[in-house]
Amino acid sequence: MNEMLLQFIWQYSLYRPNELYTTAGEPLTIIFPGKRNRDSGPDFSEARIRIGSTTLVGNIELHNKISDWDRHGHQADPSYQNIILHVVFRDDRNYKRPDFPVLELGPAIPAYVIDQYTNLIQTTRPIACARQVSGIPAIVRESWLNRLLAERWEQKLEEWKDQLRQSAGDWSLLLYWRLAANFGFKVNAVPFLMLAQSIPLTVLARHKDNLMQIEALLFGQAGMLEADFEDPYPMALQTEYRYLKRKYNLVPIVGHLWKFLRMRPANFPTVRIAQFAALIHRSVHLFAQVTSTYEVAAIRELLQVTASSYWDNHFHFGEQAARSGPKSLGNTSADNIIINTIAPLQFLYAHYHGQQIDQERALQLLSLVSPEENNIIETWEEAGWKPQNALQSQAMLQLFHQYCEPKRCLECALGLNIIRSRPAK
């Protein structure tokens, strides 16, 4: 038994309530177990209990055994001197008890509660509840997913709020930065964001009607125009960039940051930069369109861009590709941008302006996009739980990374459902 599990059992009343007696032999009734305290001080506050005919209201402390009271130094801490109950898993028989009531909870805890928890924690499967999750009621799973998506966006939006402050509240600049990071598609998200932040949006705006100049700025700032080229196209970009670099006092990022290994050529950062250049070149009032459009097809249309013709038969500067064809941003990539940039940005913008309806529309947008396909989602599907849309797949990614991997089963609604359910005989 560990104290975290004991606190969990107490919080959710996973014991036989008719078997509770203080160590002095008095019958005990738990009216309200109290509010969980995750800061310093007793574990639960505002609890209500009845000992015999006396009702008490106050704090409750839990330990594995009574002697932990002194071991944790509570005997000299004023915060612990007015508790109404000390709950322990087992009683130290030869230990002098403190002057307040003590409940030995262990005998009242059903064996299956501890067994279910032990099975979850000791499994080596990436998803501890893989064998049970499909049997958990759908309403429990769906409610938990809704909370998880909110949690995922809260974490993401905290980072974005910092970037919004860095941009002095310029929402168009925030969109530019976040779109750039998204074009990096996780592997190159950081250098892509660094690239975007190295070029003022106002500079790109001055040259947005000239695709070659936009490409020269992006490839040059990406550190990809430092070589000696023989192809006319990169040579022209290099010449244009050297002029623009001096004009705007630009400092490029280092080229070695970009990753090419173990990637499909269509996802190479060279191709993605060319597509990003095309998006900047063709976009008109992109932020206004993004924040006012809640139809998947319309947003996909905004993101339908194709890299310039040089990239039809190249993936690197100066290296002819074996296969040729236009390098367009497909629907799968567009949906990824909707999931990771457009919908969250819509939500944050609506939140800042108190537009509750638009917040809900941003959430609804995710429910209209197909779920992502990756190894984690495949693992959930193998467990018998298939997401129906991107809203659910995003929440399932949050569940896996924030709860399954660190084995936070005691903080998970699915874990609670499993631990408190008596196994079928």
Image (cartoon, helix red, strand yellow):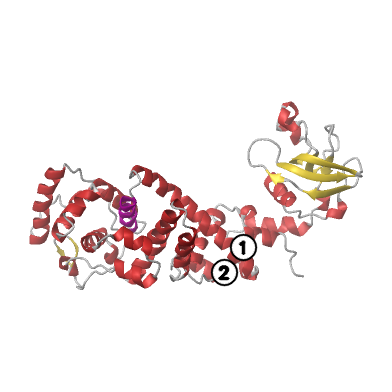
Magenta stretch secondary structure, dominant: helix
Q: Which mark is residue 383?
A: 2
- What percent of the width, then of the height, locates residue 274? 22, 61
Disc on the earlier residue, 2 or 1: 1
Q: Decide: is 240 above or below 58.
A: below
- What percent of the width, then of the height, locates residue 26? 91, 44
Residue type, mark 1 in image: Cys
Would you identify the image quadrant in which residue 322 lies?
bottom left
Q: Can residue 183 be seen in the rendering of this structure? A: no
Are the residues tagged 2 and 1 within 8 Å (C-beta)?
A: yes
Q: Give the range drawn in magenta.
A: 171-182
Q: Quick one: 176 or 310, which is closer to the camera?
A: 176
**Left or right of 325 in this view: 396:** right
Is 177 within the magenta?
yes
Residue drawn at the location 40% of the way across and 49% of the way down: 160
Q: Can residue 422 be seen in the rendering of this structure? A: yes
Residue drawn at the location 21% of the way across and 72% of the way down: 326
Residue drawn at the location 41% of the way across and 54% of the way down: 349
**Left or right of 1 in this view: 256:** left
| Residue that label 1 marks | 129
